[in-house]
Image (cartoon, rainbow, N blue to C red):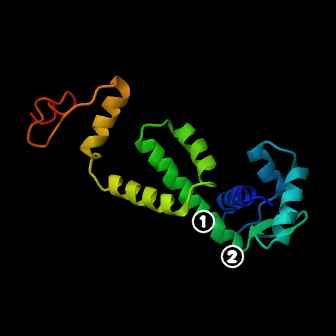
Amino acid sequence: MRKRTIEDYVELLYDLQKNKKPVHTNDIASVLNINPASVTEIFQKLNNDGYINYEKYGGATLTQKGEKIAIATKKKHDTLKKFLKILGVDEKIADMDACKIEHVVDPMTMEKLTKFVEFVQRFKGGPRWLDHFKYFYETGKYIECTLIDTAKCPFHRHKSQ
């Protein structure tokens, strides 16, 4: 079974599984807009590979192995989504793109992106250079702006007065 399929299904099971209650094939099928029989087939494979505990008509729950992968995948997804939103990407698009990227991003890249998102989120109101990036993205113009001289900055000159 492909890594992406495993990650997608265990992450979705993790999100749907409240208080360790079993998730049924119809729950997954309705979210993914696919046939429940297709979900049954995937559940059987995930069960055989030790990612879930599945009983026909009883539903599925994550095993420790599956939960570990689900949590790691969800963490990557959430970080990538936050990163894309920092760049100004629309939330829905950021969510869809994060779902694609989370399966292929190198662990070292993910580690740096995680630290970057944590770093940016610590600034109250966001770092000044993010305002500059937004301005550059929207206008194509690069602006010089320092903490000492904001008078020349079209974005920050009004905030310093």
Position in image of residue 108 (x %, y %): 49, 63
Q: Image point 69% across, 59% down: which residue?
A: 7
Above or below, comparing residue 25 to residue 46 in the picture? above
Q: Is residue 46 left or right of residue 121?
A: right
Seen from the viewer's position, the closer of residues 106 and 63 is: 106
Asked which secondary structure carries label 1, the reply is helix
Residues at badges 2 and 1 in contact (C-beta under 8 Å)?
A: no
User: What residue type is disc 1 on?
Assistant: Ile
Q: Image point 69% across, 76% down: which residue?
A: 64
Q: Image point 9% across, 33% down: which residue?
A: 161
Q: Image point 73% across, 57% down: which residue?
A: 9
Q: Is residue 111 left or right of residue 102?
A: left
Residue 19 in sight: no
> In the orientation shown, which residue stands out farthest toward the top?
139
Which quadrant of the structure image shows residue 145? Answer: top left
User: What residue type is disc 2 on?
Assistant: Gln
Q: Is residue 28 left or right of residue 81?
A: right
First in sequence: mark 2 vs mark 1: 2
Report which residue position mark 1 lands on.
71
